[in-house]
Amino acid sequence: MKKKLMLFSISFLLISGLGFAAGSKNVYRIGVFHSPTGVFHPAYATHSYDFYITRFVFETLLRYGPDGKLEPNLAKEWSASKDGTVFTFVLRDGIKFHDGTPLTAEDVKYSIEYVGFPDYKGARASFINAIKGVKEFKAGKTKDLKGIKVLDKNTIQITTEKTYSSGFLRFGINFEIFPKHIWEKVEVGKAQEATDLMRQPIGTGPFKMTEYVPDQYVTFTRFDDYWEGAPKLDKIILVKTNRDTAQAQLFRGEIDQIYPGSIRKTDADQFKAHGMVISGVPRNAYQYMTVNLTKKPFQDKRVRQAIAHALNRKGVVDNFLEGHGEVSHNPYPSTFWAHPEGMNEYKYSRDKALELFKTAGWNYDAGKNVMYLDGKPVRFQLKYSKGNVVREKCAVLFQQNLKDVGIKIDLKIMEFGVMYDEVKKSDYEIALVGQGSENDGDLSKFYYSDFIKPIGDNSGSNWIRYKNPEVDRLIDEGFRTLDQDKRQTLYRKIGLLLNEELPVIYIYHWPDNIVFTGKLKGRTIPPVAAYSYYYKANKWYFAD
Amino acid sequence: MRKYLIRRILIIIPVLFGVSIVIFALIHLAPGDPYSSMIDPNFTAEDRRNLLEAIGYYDPLPVKYVKWLGRAIQGDLGYSITYKEPVLSVILRNFKNTVVLSLTALALSVLMAVPIGVISATRKNTIFDYVVTVFSFIGISVPIFFLAMLLIKFLSFDLGLFPISGMQTIGSGYSGFMKFLDFVHHLMLPVIALALVQMAQLMRYTRSSMLEVIMQDYIRTARAKGLKERLVIYKHALRNALIPVVTVICISIGYLMSGAVLTETVFVWPGMGTLVYQSILNRDYPVVVSCALVMAFFILIANLIADILYAFIDPRIKYE
Amino acid sequence: MPEALLEIQDLVTSFKTTSGLQRVLDGINLSLRRGEILGLVGESGCGKSITSLSIMRLLPQPYGFIENGKILFNDKELTDLSIPEMESIRGNEISMIFQEPMTALNPVFTIGNQIEEVLDIHQDLKKRDKKEKCIEMLKLVGLPRAKDVYNEYPHQLSGGMRQRVMIAMALSCEPRLLIADEPTTALDVTVQIQILELMKSLQKDMNTSILLITHDLGVIAEMCDRVAVMYLGKIVEETTTVNIFDNPLHPYSQGLLNSRLGNIQKGEKLICIPGMVPTLSDKPQGCFFSPRCSKCIDRCKTDMPELNEVKPGHKVRCWLYVDEDY
């Protein structure tokens, strides 16, 4: 009995020791809080955690560079016709897939038109809607999409119906290229049942996926024939971790990187003390308070401006984000190229708020601290969702801020999907939501009046139901030109208009934080969140 | 007894049927759908509609149920919307992990709780008994995720005796026996957390069952026969005291098959608990319904086995 | 005169309670001869059962303990014995049967198993002999299907049958003393008589002495050679059965006899002893019975009388029978 105990204790200690030595030299481990679901096909992935895989194993024609601008990736050159309807991409030579097959323009054509096959049942059917011949192709009348032409082994040309200002973004960034010779063998309608094939993705990226254990980890191993040079690291592993213990794992060396969400100063100090690098990647998104524009009280812009003055938005950034973020006055963060100058900052001022409410015809009773509208005390319900700690704190703060101007707020916390659904149907009074924008600056999805659907219909992308003919006009102009400078002027104008009109009350922009071990060298992170996490991963190495 | 057994087994079918209807209705009637959390601006409403059509979302509820039932009867539990994998394979994978975790924790807690409960009863109101009672109350009151975090903080983070989470050391390349040891190493902390909480309940239950039995007349008779006190307790009393305890353990096995979501979450041990929880959040309908069926099935079976066991160990019980 | 098998001298048994020490037995004196049946009678709560538990040293732990006194059994001082020594006496030289046969047997073991257990503890028999002896005992106590009962469980037997089993178990090692604590109280009247008959015949065959505890005077009349009357932890009268019925001396004994139902005619008022038995913590000054005694004199209220032999073979604890000058 004693002998068995001894044997057990020795193996135990051995393993404890080994366990930590096994952070072996050339393996980089990234902790993630949700597990990828195993849909590792660019045309079918819908969960953001699957994008961690598809945007790593597969590559796009272009990518964002360290200056935030588009730079060559699989394509070495790209150009468009003057009228913005013909887009041409020239591929590099010598790019191989992970199975050794060379990449050609045929693969590019296949990857783009795939979402138009009549039997395609994925989420990206709308991505190709601008291309010529798409209707016939989707209806099954043509065998392939005529608007995409393979000019030669390395050159591909895409023709659109009208001027397509988002052309480079859409074709260069939104389509990861996957191998035709593998997927043309699978019936499109049944592709999602090809689970094994899905989970052995063959792409062109610097690392190939070699192991997927659902809900636990995903292993990527170096691809020595990578076109930009063989990686220095042996493996990169995505490890499922628990948000509460991830930091501990980081400090103990069980993992090398996490995406911690918002960071507090105490966290930041701890990270630095343990030799971690904190990188805040700008994100083209904003958190905002939406007030239901279909309801009469909110249709007066003075009311919305008053609310903006009443809310302590700077306090949110200073206290909840501890400086990791900035106050928002319009959809574009200061790091974005379309960010306008000279905006109204709607500084936190109770007096200014009360003044504006008064001009809008609301009556404030200072003695009772109650705001009256049409003789009734003002009271609204604020919906928000679980899961974002800062936003939850904002809800409570804003409740207090509005109470200070006599407005009673009832908080309602809900599951995100349910809340989002109600809000899109216009079934709400006030809500707190976050929104991401297109990286080409186009705000049409959210503010263009054509995208409004009737109340109760949750399918319109402009679900705040904002209608401004001037904004519509500027957006239309933006559609019609590929000239970056012209577009910058136009979008800046839109930014200023939205800042004045406040269809929603903009609260803050925030960076995507990445925290990783200082031992990793050779890493550059372009300032475009979600598209830059693996930038030139083949150059990463451990300093030792 | 045989008629009883057959009756009980046959009843499982209508119960599972009922469970399937109720759970199916509840999860489909919940607001939201599998794609309602898709906020990426690139995806349009048209895209979402295509996805929902592909999974038959727009069929009326009874039609959905009949379609599902038709396939389920033939053994086809459908495809997971989240994983794009057959439901059965998803469940089996998670179920295996739950079984290992739960049964090990149960074994540990029984091995510790029953003897301690018995000794505690025989030494009522001594220091030993008081310490055990305090410990039980702590175990019953402390939320398990808090306990788990404490264990991780002290045993993993500070002392480095155990890994913080996961089922294996990532990137280690272990195989064979080393891999097994590594797995056991990762299993220990979650098992300890679960076992401590289960132990608390079981200890008190054993103790009170034992106390009740020791009061009985036949214990006095045993002593009057000149039986050594040790045998009075461990033969006459224990045998009776364990009857309800054994059945309680048996029934709890049924519930354990449903997983322990908090423990599994903290320790990143993908089991039935996390699967059910995530599937409900993701509105992964086929998985939710199938999980409910699996859980119901095991609870029914465990109850049946408990009843049969009861009849075996208590001669007073007889089934018609 | 046949020698005393059991002699209890000034036995004081107390209980530790939350309200202090309670004296349940307040100086008990008893003697029991070989081959005799001694009845111990009294109302509920007077300490009859505690007397028997004290002899067996089976007082509830850790509350009960023998504070003082001697219990001499067969030349052994029981209060001095160690636990293992006591264990070898229980079930072997002194056996006990209890009031509730329904709960006195372990429900999960067979009858045979439980009887054989006694044999295992005290005797060294081979398996076959054990079984034979067991079945023999079952036959002896009047169970016709002895072989079947051997394999049955307690819940399959009636109350009367279970009590027979208890008797079989108690007598299987041929004890010198059998303590029977209200063995028939919980049984039907018809079954009562059978059990009593059985006990009497077995006693004669084995020459076992019996300490028969009861509150039923009818049982005393039927079974006992001598009888002791207990009140509030003290023996108040001790004599032969004939004497106690013909000539009860102590007012309490008289009261007990008068309250029997047998002598009452229809329409007459029931006679009972006025008042209630005091609690242990409220024991009266002087003679315990004085507050309820119709013949109480002044002295009774201040002094406790001794148990004196006022006639040959007749002891009583009462001032009425004490000629003393003050």
Image: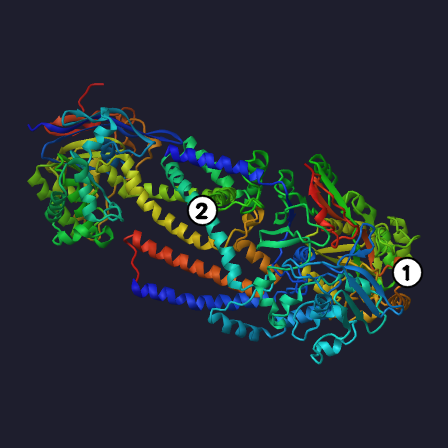
Q: What residue do we see at 54% from left, 68% from top?
A: B78
Report the amino acid beneath label 1: Leu
Residue C292 quadrant: top left
The chain ID associated with circle 2 is B
Q: How crowded is mark 2: few (under 14 residues within 10 Å), some or many (20 or more)?
A: some
Front residue (pair A257, A244): A257
Instruction: Identify residue for label 2.
Output: B104
User: Where's the C terminus of chain A, which quadrant?
Assistant: top right
Visible in this render: residue A361?
Answer: no
B58 w.r.t. A69: above or below: below
**The quarter of the displayed image where residue A487 is located:** bottom right
- Asked whether residue B50 appears in the rendered view, the answer is yes
> Residue tagged by mark 1?
A497
Q: In this view, does B140 lie above or below C4?
A: below
Q: Quadrant of the N terminus of chain A?
A: top left
Which residue occupies the extreme top position in the image? C326
Point 55% across, 39% down: residue: A19
Q: Give whichever of B251, A244 is nearer the camera.
A: A244
Residue A366 lies, in percent from the top left, at: 86, 50
Q: Helix, strand, or loop for circle 2?
A: helix
- Tell whether C70 sits left or right of B105: left
Labels 2, 1: front one: 2
